[in-house]
Image (spheres, helix red, strand yellow):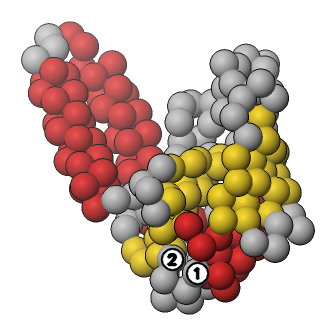
Amino acid sequence: MSNYTFRKSVLEKPQHWELTGQELVCTQEGGANFRIPYTRVQKIRLLYLPNNRYRLNNYCCKITMTNNRTFDINSCTYESFATFPDQAETYIPFVKELVKNVKAANPDCKILTGQTPFAYYGNIVFVVVAVSFLFLIFSWLPVDYGKFYIIIKLIVIVYMGAYLAKSIKVNKPRQLSVNEIPDYVLPKTGNKNEQSLS
């Protein structure tokens, strides 16, 4: 029996998730407590989900039930303003056991990695359009801004390139045919990667 606790934001209380023999149980102080039988899980999607600049190493396990209700379990947890520690050490074993238990009880459950095809290709198009628009704006700047213009271009290229490379690798839509979860859809262990303003 494995368990995992995380908090999405300052506006929400911590969620405590627990795996039992037949179901997934969630309890939340002041919130709705519920049980999800493994047989009612339609699909599990594992993806990279950097919600903001303080949660750059955030991964998500999205559970979809047969009634299309969804639940997100994040690898980073809210601790305080702009501080989201990485909980890879407890998130990874929990997610692996969840997938194993669900597939044992419900062999028809789909295990997916990455975003939906619409979101994946839509994000790529959005980034390409946004970068093109930025370059168009920069090209209209007066020539006096020459060096500044080149530096800004390089910063944009490096930043967007790094984000896009990781997103393309990790979030490409795939369906797993085995229960073994690839490392690229799980956070790295041994690196807390805590993002904060301090």
Report the label total: 2
Q: Residue at horizontal 77%, vertical 24%?
A: 30
Q: Is residue 194 visible?
A: no
User: Residue 90's quadrant in the figure?
Assistant: bottom right
Q: Is residue 125 left or right of residue 180?
A: left
Q: Is residue 33 visible?
A: yes
Label 1 SS: loop
Disc 1 packing (10 Å; few <14; some 14–19; many ≥20) = some
Q: Which residue carries the number 2 mark?
A: 109
Image coordinates for residue 38, horizontal then vertical, percent = 64, 70
* Residue 106 coordinates in the image, percent (x, y): 58, 81
Q: Residue at x 60, y 73 (%)?
A: 39
Residue at which label 1 appears: 106
Q: Which sits in the foreground, 185 or 12?
A: 12
Residue type of the residue flagged with mark 1: Asn
Secondary structure category for the residue under label 2:
loop
Q: Residues within 10 Å of mark 2 (few under 14, many from 20)?
A: many
Q: Given the image, on which type of amino acid does mark 2 rest?
A: Cys
**x then y, percent, for residue 118:** 25, 55
Q: Which mark is residue 34?
A: none
- Work out whether residue 145 or residue 36 is closer to the camera in this orientation and state it: 36
Cβ–Cβ below 8 Å for labels 1 and 2? Answer: yes
The structure residue drawn at horizontal position 53% and vertical position 36%, both measured from the top left corner, is 51
Along the viewing direction, whichever of 133 and 168 lies nearer the viewer? 168
* Residue 157 horizontal side relative to residue 38, left or right: left
Q: Is residue 112 above or below residue 156?
A: below
Image coordinates of residue 86 in percent, x first then y, are: 76, 45
Image quadrant in which the N terminus is located: bottom right
